[in-house]
Amino acid sequence: MPKLSSQRRNGREADETRNARELLVLPSAQLKPRSNNHKATARRAQPEQRKNAGAALENVARKLLVEIGEDPTREGLVRTPKRMANAWEFLTSGYRADVLEILNGALFNEKYNEMVIVKDIDFYSLCEHHLLPFYGKCHVAYVPDGRVVGLSKIPRIVDVFARRLQVQERMTNEIANTLMEVLQPAGVAVVTEARHLCMLMRGVQKQNTVVTNSAVLGLFHEDRACREEFMQLISHRQMG
Ligand code: ZN
């Protein structure tokens, strides 16, 4: 049973302590997820395909402008399809990122078994129902069981799943499941809080609605005190 006093550490501290740890480099075959549900391993597109995708996205953007009644040849819009294609490449880059590649080389054998929390991770995602942004904060905690990860990697994992078309619930689960699979910790907890532009700009137009989701696995699921400690530690900084 791990001791549950918690510690907040940042990326810099993690890097400073890196040398003191035994670096754990796993061949990626060993890190393959058991299931493919959360798509930790991305479908990697070839450069030529990506170039075509860029041109195809520009065509879609031009068509969109025409369909909404705009003139894509007017001065302000001439370069918009190109800009939009570039923006969409970035906003969906999570499909082409590889979680296992990001984490490999940042995993360490460590007899540390207290709760590790990284909170207030900003994320920006796109809802798959309206292709409009939802954005907010993600809080991640885990209780290691012999293996820790460089803390700067956790926000990068959040980005991998945020930069796709998402529903908030699935994104929250994917982040938690990935950490559970790769770190094999005693437990993982992820809480996301977000504002959805599809709610704010259209539809119900509820300006202050913050949607909160959580995924609790292992110890955080089984041990109420552990879960409550995490919830309490993130409670004072929730999205206003
Ligand atoms: Zn939506």
Image: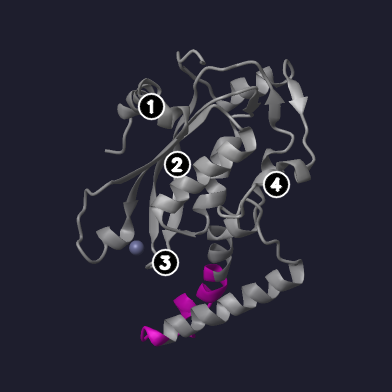
Q: Label 3 vs label 1: CA separation?
A: 33 Å
Q: Amino acid at mark 2?
A: Asp
Question: Tag 2, which secondary structure?
Answer: strand
Residues under numbered marks 3 and 2 in contact, where contact means CB atoms less than 8 Å apart: no
Q: Disc 4, ligand 1: is the CB inside 8 Å?
A: no
**In this rendering, the label closer to the viewer, 2 or 4:** 4
Q: Which residues are magenta?
A: 67-84
The quadrant in which the C terminus is found is top left
Q: Nearer the viewer, residue 170 or 139?
A: 170
Among numbered discs 2 and 4, the one appearing first in the sequence = 4
Q: Give left or right: position of 125 versus 197.
A: right
Q: Nearer the viewer, residue 79 or 138?
A: 138
Which disc number belongs to residue 227?
Answer: 1
Q: Give left or right: position of 109 versus 191.
A: right
Residues under numbered marks 4 and 1 in contact, where contact means CB atoms less than 8 Å apart: no
Question: Tag 1, which secondary structure?
Answer: helix
Which disc number belongs to residue 131?
Answer: 3
Is 82 one of the magenta-colored residues?
yes
